[in-house]
């Protein structure tokens, strides 16, 4: 049986041997970090390209179309072609832009979401940094995107962009609350913020959904999490900051070329991060669905679960109309947050009187 | 120092700390305006204070051009007035001219006209449904609608060779007889289409987000609707009976059974409801027309040069896909109309927009605009 941890150990072992042979083994910690970051960047970029292709195929399937099928086998290289197109495109800038925030915004949007990937455990012992406050970190760092979107909207000097920026600020701030509230029940039970430890808890005590005590509150939490995460990533039906039929492109109306690509990439990475957290916290991360399937490496299971969750997020986008801005706020504050708080209470009761008493 | 500041504030009055209106131009190039309609919208945050449609970006002076063309030549221009429902405008002009000159098309031509106009109504409503859903943010129904519209366009292409501007309904009849396989193909389409309507309804009608966005939004009360000249399905959504096919039957609409689709609330959802029901009614009308189609001539013998009687005038109206389509013609004894005026449903429906959107959000402009079903070339002509 091969595990992700073994692969990781082998690769880093080879790296360290190479460094020792060159006589610079004191650089090993630095090289480790850099290698991890590069691997992460490449892996995520390729995965995003796959997701963009997948989204096109999913939407095509739902709309009785064929989707991309010309570039590469099954059109898999279509996104590569598009990425090349975006990089060599003329960079059109509004003359009266506010220069500094205009240039920084796409970088923040990309970096803030990308940083969220750092603590995700892909397999037992496989994460760039196994942080003890993992969940808190992910939610905090991805919350930075609001700064990017707001400054993009402000600095573009475009009325639609500004409206999009304002909408986004309101939306992300509102949906951060149910997002956090939906994770707290899990933290209450597991007693840790560490993402790997939460998976280990599930490995020891079984999946949440197989435990009749926890099944209902965790399911509610999961649904709230997916809904809020979709809103956090500005995806339909919560895509009001870039509502095409109202605000043209919303906050990225005035961005083109690479800067647009960074926003675009950021949106997809935000989806990946949210889905990864959902998989880790609610669906058992790298654990196989049945113990007898354990011979398949953990990171494969992780990816399978991730793609399934992302598929549902994509299916939402191509099924539902878009909410209006006030309805979106009302839904967040009047529906999701009360349910999340009640759910928290329910989990507390379950944990205090039933699980511990049993 | 403080006094100075205070006096400055007093002198400046409100203007020093006053807030400006946020004026946004939705259009002429904007993804939601279905062409080149421009809306100057005054906003207070997200709330709409005023919506002012600015027209003329697609003005092609079709009415004036018609004054310099003979009557049969004008038909070609009518296609361009409403490209989504070209058959209806063809029919409106052909009927007006026939009435002006005291002509009548043979029965087969009349039945064929009904078949094509009703097919066109379905095609137009399908495109509308997709665009409306797209305005609200659901992109998938658009492709479902186009999938079926494509089969209607195939039927049109089979008959007259064109897919958008048909020039098929002519003065005194129709351009060409249908092919023998048209009737079975059309029936097959109708059977297929009836199974597809529930699909659209499943995707939209009772979708909670769709209901949130359309129920109670943009309510046209019967009084406002009648006073603003709203017509067609948009007015029927308010429960006002205004179907020209019923009130002033033309062709053989008095010989087929169909019901006028009405809704009660006058909001976007009611207008959606009316159009979905109209598609079903059109299917039943087409079936009845196909049943009663009998062999015969398809056009009356026309004089070599078609001249209107001197000092004659006519206002003739039909129910196009968008509402009342009226043609006013003045003849002066020559082969060209002295004056041609198109009374288009989209134009009269546009100006209720301001009343419907005041105090609502930006996103509601799109929902209301979509639900009124306007076609910009028909507004500007």
Image: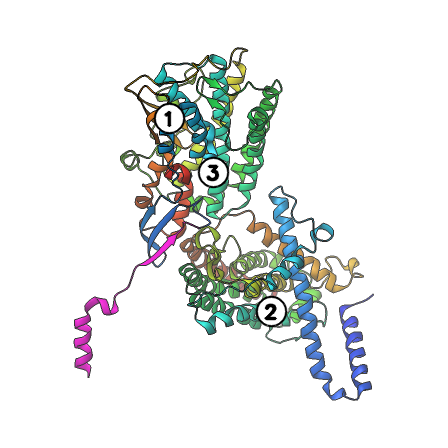
Separation of residues labelled 2 and 1 (CA atoms): 58 Å
Q: Which residue is mark 1?
A: B243
**Region of the chain picked out in magenta, as a range:** B1-29
To which residue does mark 2 refer? A114
The x, y position of residue B209, in whole percent, is 47, 47
Q: Which residue is mark 3?
A: B128
- Disc 1 is attached to a residue of which chain? B
Please, what secondary structure does the residue beneath circle 3 have? helix
Q: Give how far across and how far down residue A267 sits, in percent.
A: 56, 62
* Drawn side of residue A106 relative to residue B372, left or right: right
Q: Are marks 1 and 3 on the same chain?
A: yes
Q: Nearer the viewer, mark 3 or mark 2?
A: 3
Instruction: Please give the chain letter of the residue carrying mark 2.
Output: A
Q: Considering the numbered disc 1 on the image, is that residue within a helix, a strand or a loop?
A: loop
Residue at the image point whose x is 40% and y is 21% from the top = B95
Q: Are marks 1 and 3 in contact (CB under 8 Å)?
A: no
Can residue A25 be seen at all in this image of the molecule?
yes
The label shown at residue B14 is none
């Amino acid at each position: 049986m091969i595990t992700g941890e073994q692969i990781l150990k082998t690769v880093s072992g080879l790296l360290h041997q190479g460094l020792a042979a060159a006589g610079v083994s004191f650089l090993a910690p630095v090289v480790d970090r850099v290698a991890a970051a590069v691997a992460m960047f490449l892996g995520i970029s390729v995965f995003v390209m796959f997701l963009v292709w997948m989204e096109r195929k999913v939407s095509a399937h739902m709309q009785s179309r064929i989707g991309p099928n010309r570039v590469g086998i099954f059109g898999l290289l279509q996104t590569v072609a598009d990425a090349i197109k975006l990089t060599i495109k003329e960079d059109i800038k509004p003359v009266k832009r506010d220069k500094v925030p205009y240039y920084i915004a796409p970088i923040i949007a990309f970096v803030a979401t990308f940083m969220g990937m750092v603590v995700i455990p892909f397999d037992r012992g496989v994460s760039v940094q196994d942080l003890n406050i993992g969940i808190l970190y992910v939610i905090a760092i991805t919350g930075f995107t609001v700064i990017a979107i707001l400054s993009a909207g402000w600095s573009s000097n475009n009325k639609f962009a500004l409206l999009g920026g304002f909408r986004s600020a309101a939306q992300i701030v509102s949906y951060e609350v149910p997002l956090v509230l939906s994770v707290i029940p899990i933290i209450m039970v597991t007693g840790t913020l560490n993402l790997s430890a939460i998976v280990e808890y599930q490995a020891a005590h079984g999946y949440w959904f197989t435990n009749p005590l926890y099944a209902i509150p965790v399911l509610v939490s999961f649904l709230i999490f997916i809904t809020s995460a979709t809103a956090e990533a500005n995806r339909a039906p919560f895509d009001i900051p870039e509502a095409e039929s109202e605000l043209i492109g919303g906050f990225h109306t005035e961005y083109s070329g690479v800067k647009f690509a960074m926003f675009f990439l950021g949106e997809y990475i935000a989806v990946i991060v949210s889905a990864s957290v959902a998989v880790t916290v609610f669906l058992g991360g790298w654990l196989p669905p049945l113990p007898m399937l354990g011979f398949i490496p953990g990171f494969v299971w992780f990816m399978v679960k991730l793609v399934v969750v992302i598929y549902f997020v994509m299916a939402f986008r191509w099924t539902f109309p878009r909410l209006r801005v006030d309805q979106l706020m009302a839904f967040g504050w009047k529906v999701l947050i009360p349910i999340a708080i009640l759910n928290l209470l329910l989990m507390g009761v379950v944990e205090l009187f039933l699980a511990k008493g049993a | 120092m403080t006094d100075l500041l205070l006096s400055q504030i007093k002198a400046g009055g409100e203007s020093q700390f006053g807030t400006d209106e946020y004026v946004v131009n939705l259009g002429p190039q904007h993804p939601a305006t279905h062409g080149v309609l421009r809306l100057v919208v005054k906003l207070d945050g997200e709330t709409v204070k005023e919506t002012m449609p600015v027209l003329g970006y697609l003005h092609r002076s079709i009415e004036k051009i018609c004054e310099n063309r003979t009557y049969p030549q004008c038909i070609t221009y009518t296609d361009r007035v409403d490209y989504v429902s070209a058959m209806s405008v063809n029919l409106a002009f052909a009927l007006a001219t026939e009435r002006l000159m005291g002509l009548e098309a043979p029965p087969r031509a009349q039945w064929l006209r009904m078949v094509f106009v009703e097919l066109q109504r379905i095609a137009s409503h399908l495109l509308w449904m997709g665009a409306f859903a797209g305005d609200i943010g659901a992109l998938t129904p658009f492709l479902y609608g186009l999938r079926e519209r494509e089969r209607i366009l195939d039927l049109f292409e089979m008959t007259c060779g064109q897919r958008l501007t048909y020039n098929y309904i002519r003065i005194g009849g129709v351009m060409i007889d249908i092919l023998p396989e048209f009737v079975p193909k059309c029936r097959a389409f109708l059977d297929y289409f009836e199974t597809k309507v529930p699909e659209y309804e499943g995707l939209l009608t009772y979708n909670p987000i769709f209901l949130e966005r359309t129920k109670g939004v943009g309510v046209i009360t019967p009084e406002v609707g009648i006073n603003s000249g709203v017509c067609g399905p948009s007015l029927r959504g308010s429960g006002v009976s205004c179907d020209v096919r019923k009130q002033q039957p033309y062709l053989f609409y008095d010989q087929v059974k169909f019901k006028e689709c009405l809704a009660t609330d006058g909001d976007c959802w009611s207008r959606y409801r009316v159009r979905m029901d109209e598609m079903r009614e059109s299917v039943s009308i087409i079936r009845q027309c196909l049943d009663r189609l009998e062999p015969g001539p398809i056009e009356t013998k026309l004089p070599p040069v078609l001249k209107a009687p001197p000092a004659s005038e006519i206002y003739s109206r039909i129910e196009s896909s968008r509402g009342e389509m009226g043609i006013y013609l003045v003849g002066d004894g020559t082969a060209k109309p002295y004056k041609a005026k198109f009374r288009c449903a989209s134009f009269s429906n546009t100006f209720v927009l301001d009343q419907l959107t005041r105090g609502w959000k930006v996103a509601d402009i799109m929902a209301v605009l979509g639900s009124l079903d306007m076609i910009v070339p028909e507004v500007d002509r």
